[in-house]
Image (cartoon, rainbow, N blue to C red):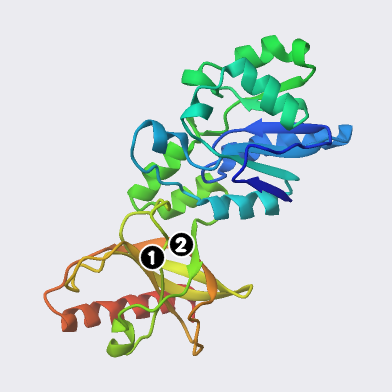
Amino acid sequence: MQYITGTREFQIEEPSVVTLGKFDGLHRGHQKLLNEVFRFRERGYKTAVFTFETAPGTLMQGRLQTMITTNGERRDNLERAGIDYLVEYPFNQEVARIDPETFISHILTGQMSAKAIVSGTDCRFGYKRGGDVALLERLAPKYGYELAVVEKALDGAREISSTYVREELAAGHIEKANELLGYTYAVHGSVIHGRHLGSTLGFPTVNIEPGSQKHLPAFGVYLSQTVIDGTCRGSITNIGKKPTITGERPAGVETYIYDLNEDLYGKWIEVRLLRFLRPEMKFLNVDELKRQVLNDKETGRRMHGL
């Protein structure tokens, strides 16, 4: 996959089929869009996704907009899906003022060489979100592209959306979130040094900091799987701020990996969340915390069948 990011100066030379959106989470609704995109390969078109480097809401609302998948995770997901081009366009006030027709003529059919555009029914783009499916349809003959509009994927009567996934994550309903995503929600990162509390208590853990952009689920303990160098291992994971331990700290991801005796510091790992076990708790003291973590550890071992 060709990954174009950090610049507005680019040109795709080959005729392409383009779809646009945030693609936050790359859930089953997004996958339905991509399936339509891939259909155009029969015409010899390259497949391309247009998105923004920074979520527009971060600039327009003046606060960080977290993402179910970080930019890196989104890139990896789209590459695995088989997309040929991913464009992460820088977003600023100047870009926010681009007229919708100019967006089509200069970026989609110009720089991206779109001969086909695949859109969801609620697609909005351009200045004040003035562009929509009706405009894409009206301008198709003028700019020489074919438009395909994809209906929303449904879960019962409800549309599958990033908002829906976020709601389930916030409630700790990780199994439902995974169902909506169509894959297992995961946190990726390099293993860092923590406070070594796990080692002190007799069960060493690995720590990763997901970063402020990452949208985390409800704080608590999860049954998990950890992928290390392509190998998947049973684990349990705590997500949160460790309220029993004094001092302020950012939300982190701390994982105990069963039957592992290996130095992982600096190694890139993927932690996949399978089931919510219990909410994050503040214990009276470290001994009480140790008893609960030992119980969590044995619960996880039984559930993993280890």
Task: Give the residue at mark 1.
Answer: 222
Amino acid bearing label 1: Tyr
Q: Position of residue 225 (x, y in %)?
A: 50, 70
Q: Is residue 138 left or right of residue 72?
A: right
Q: Is residue 142 left or right of residue 33?
A: right
Amino acid bearing label 2: Leu
Tell me which residue sits at (39%, 70%) in the image.
237
Q: How many marks?
A: 2
Q: Position of residue 233 (x, y in %)?
A: 54, 76
Q: Position of residue 146 (x, y in %)?
A: 77, 20
Tell me which residue sits at (63%, 18%) in the image.
102
Looking at the picture, tell me which residue is in the foreground, 270 or 115. Answer: 115
Asked where in the image residue 164 lies, by quadrant, the reply is top left
Task: Look at the image and tell me whether residue 83 can be seen.
Answer: yes
Q: How many residues crowd around disc 1 within 10 Å: few (fewer than 14), some, or many (20 or more)?
A: many
Vertical relation: 28 (above or below) 231: above
Looking at the picture, tell me which residue is in the foreground, 172 or 14. Answer: 14
Tell me which residue sits at (47%, 39%) in the image.
55
Vertical relation: 30 (above or below) 293: above
Q: Is residue 278 left or right of residue 65?
A: left
Looking at the picture, tell me which residue is in the foreground, 247 or 78. Answer: 247
Q: Tell me, yes or no, whether the two marked residues, 1 and 2, touch with CB atoms within 8 Å.
A: yes
Q: Secondary structure at mark 2?
A: strand
- The first of marks 1 and 2 along the sequence is 1
Vertical relation: 78 (above or below) 94: below
Task: Look at the image and tell me whether residue 117 can be seen.
Answer: no
Q: Secondary structure at mark 1?
A: strand
Task: Give the residue at mark 2.
Answer: 273
Asked where in the image residue 276 lies, by quadrant, the reply is bottom left
Asked where in the image residue 248 lies, by quadrant, the reply is bottom left
3D distance between C-alphas at marks 1 and 2: 6 Å
Residue 151 tag number: none
